[in-house]
């Protein structure tokens, strides 16, 4: 059976991240996001299973996703919705995780100390070894809402991400040596959204 990993995190700083949320969603959006009561997701058991695979660009097929890939995609959708993100921000997040990990919460065989859905590096300030591999914390960090890291995320670097090329918005956070890859996966992210978003409730836990 997959296991959960309980992690402690510092108390969030409200000022910087709260103001950025307000600018992105508006005051009403903050109230709505904070008051969301997920129906199905509230009782959902989201796993923290790890996998290992080589660091290559081949291998992701949106029409042949494994159960783990589907679960991780749904969780990204649920967590983004829990923060008030709609289709644009969620697609950027999905495409980034596709490029970085094929939607596996994995520990790579190479690539330094990278880990998790977004291949975040503890040595680059993204959190501890455990935190970058904790799916909820990794998603929050990518979005710019992770209290465990001071690294800027999507809301800090591209608060007007809806007006940006989505691949460029992802690259602003990831600073990859292959920036073109994020845009190439936006079509797959759209397919995943269309398939699963209607049945996934926001996750705020």
Image (cartoon, rainbow, N blue to C red):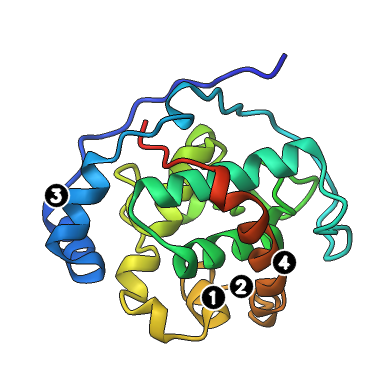
Kindly state the secondary structure of the residue where label 2 is placed: loop
Number of residues whose C-alpha sits closer than 10 Å to that of mark 3, classed few (under 14), some (14–19) or many (20 or more)? few
The answer to whether 199 appears left or right of 60 in the picture is left
Q: Does the image show residue 17?
A: no
The answer to whether 31 appears left or right of 5 in the picture is left
> How much space separates mark 2 and mark 1, taking CA atoms?
6 Å
Kindly state the secondary structure of the residue where label 4 is placed: helix
For marks 2 and 3, the one nearer the N-term is 3
Give the vertical position of 82 relative to 22 (above or below). Answer: above
For marks 4 and 1, the one nearer the N-term is 1
- Residue sitting at x 51%, y 86%: 165
- Residue sitting at x 42%, y 42%: 202
| Mark number, residue 14 | 3
For marks 4 and 3, the one nearer the N-term is 3
For marks 4 and 2, the one nearer the N-term is 2
Place residue 104 in its image quadrant: top right
- Residue sitting at x 71%, y 53%: 101
Report the residue marked by disc 1: 171
Q: Nearer the viewer, residue 137 or 26?
A: 26
Report the residue marked by disc 2: 176
> How much space separates mark 4 and mark 3, taking CA atoms?
34 Å
Give percent across and percent down for residue 33: 26, 48
Give percent across and percent down for residue 185: 70, 71
Q: Is there CB contact under 8 Å for labels 2 and 1?
A: yes
Place residue 57 in its image quadrant: bottom right
For marks 1 and 3, the one nearer the N-term is 3
Kindly state the secondary structure of the residue where label 1 is placed: helix
> How much space separates mark 4 and mark 2, taking CA atoms?
19 Å
Q: Nearer the viewer, residue 41 or 22?
A: 41
Q: Is there CB contact under 8 Å for labels 4 and 3?
A: no
Q: Is there CB contact under 8 Å for labels 4 and 2?
A: no
Report the residue marked by disc 4: 188
């Amino acid at each position: 059976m997959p296991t959960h990993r309980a992690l402690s995190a510092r108390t969030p700083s409200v000022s910087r991240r709260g103001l950025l949320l307000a600018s992105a969603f508006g005051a009403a959006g903050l109230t709505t996001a904070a008051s969301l009561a997920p129906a199905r997701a509230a009782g959902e058991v989201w796993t923290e299973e790890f996998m290992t695979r080589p660091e290559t660009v081949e291998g992701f097929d949106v029409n042949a996703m494994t159960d783990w890939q589907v679960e991780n995609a749904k969780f990204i959708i649920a967590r983004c919705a829990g923060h008030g993100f709609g289709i644009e921000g969620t697609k950027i997040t999905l495409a980034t995780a596709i490029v970085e990990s094929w939607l596996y919460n994995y520990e790579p065989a190479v690539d330094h100390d990278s880990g998790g859905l977004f291949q975040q590096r503890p040595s680059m300030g993204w959190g501890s070894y455990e935190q970058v591999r904790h799916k909820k914390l990794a998603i929050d960090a990518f979005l710019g809402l992770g209290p465990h890291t001071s690294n800027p995320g999507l809301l800090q670097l591209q608060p007007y991400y809806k007006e940006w090329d989505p691949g460029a918005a992802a690259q602003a956070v990831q600073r990859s040596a292959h920036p073109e890859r994020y845009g190439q996966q936006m079509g797959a992210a759209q397919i995943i959204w269309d398939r699963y978003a209607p049945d996934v409730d926001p996750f705020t836990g």
